[in-house]
Structure formats: C-alpha cells, structure tokens
Image (cartoon, rainbow, N blue to C red):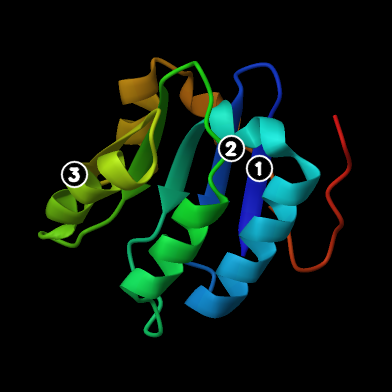
Amino acid sequence: MRFRIDEKSRLLFIDLDSGVSAQKAMNISLGLFDRRPDLWSWDWIVQATVVPEDASIDHMARLARAHVGHERVATSILVSHDRALHLWARVMDFQFPGRRHTVVRSVEEGLDRLGLPRRLLDGPADRLDRNPVGKP
C-alpha cells in the first residue's frame, strides 16, 4: 500500500492498486489515522481500480466506526472502473458524516475535481507497510 501526504494541499492519496489485501490496508489505515487524526478532515484520493478480493462491507463498517467527525466537509475521491461503485459511494456519504464520496476514472480527474495541480503526485510515494508515519 502506497500513500502520499501533501501537507500544503491537505490531501491524502492512498494507492490500493499495489497488491495489498483489504484486511492489511484496513489495519495500516487505522494505524495512520490513530497517529494523524487530522487526516480525517482532509480530502482523500483513494486509487482502487482493482478492489482487493477480500474487501467487504465489514471493512467499511470498521473504518466508519473509527471515523472522527469534523466541521469541514471533506471529499473522498474514489478512483475505480467499477460501474456500480457510485451506488456504494452514496451509502458512504451517510456512513462518514462530513465526507462526500465521488467516483472518478483516473487520479488526474480526481485532482481536477479537487482543483489541485496534477504535479502533486509526481515522484515516489511512501509505503505505509515499510515506513512509520510521523506526526505533523
């Protein structure tokens, strides 16, 4: 699982296309949010063009239970080719108060929707499973 944190833009980019299981991604993500609870209020781009085979609604429910509310409405951009994911995105709007979920076909389209420059994702991403995430 790869990720990038852009402090200036307050953007968290998570790449689930790197062959990680849903269970491992969930455990890593919860650890990240424990160390950086401020990330709950940031915009996210989650690249999951190929959804992990073990993904289930239980994973999303577990993440929703851990969700920390915030005043700012944040956006979750889900990059996927799944034609039905937009239906689940509507459900996630209710599971995660203060977050709006949108499905797009590319990371570039997600950055455009957020009004962010495409250069934000240039360069290598960090790997959550190798590097600890420090506090801001």
Helix or strand or loop: what does disc 1 sit on?
Answer: strand
> Which of disc 2 and disc 1 is earlier in sequence?
1
Query: Which residue is located at x 50 percent, y 17 percent?
Result: 71
Query: Which residue is located at x 85 percent, y 29 percent?
Result: 136
Question: Can I make out residue 51 in this image?
Answer: no
Residue 4: mark in rendering = 1
Q: In this view, does 43 lie above or below 19?
A: above
Q: Report how far apart the C-alphas of labels 1 and 3 lie in the structure.
A: 25 Å
Indicate the amino acid at tag 1: Arg
- Which is nearer the eye, 17 or 122? 17
> Which of disc 3 and disc 1 is earlier in sequence?
1
Indicate the amino acid at tag 3: Arg
Task: Give the residue at mark 3.
Answer: 90
Task: Sort mark 3 into few (<14), some (14-19) or many (20+) by Cα contacts within 10 Å.
Answer: some
Q: Where is residue 114 in the image (x, y as percent from the top left)?
A: 38, 21
Query: Which residue is located at x 42 percent, y 53 percent?
Result: 47
Q: Report how far apart the C-alphas of labels 2 and 3 lie in the structure.
A: 21 Å
> Which of disc 3 and disc 2 is earlier in sequence?
2
Q: In this view, does 77 lie above or below 87?
A: above
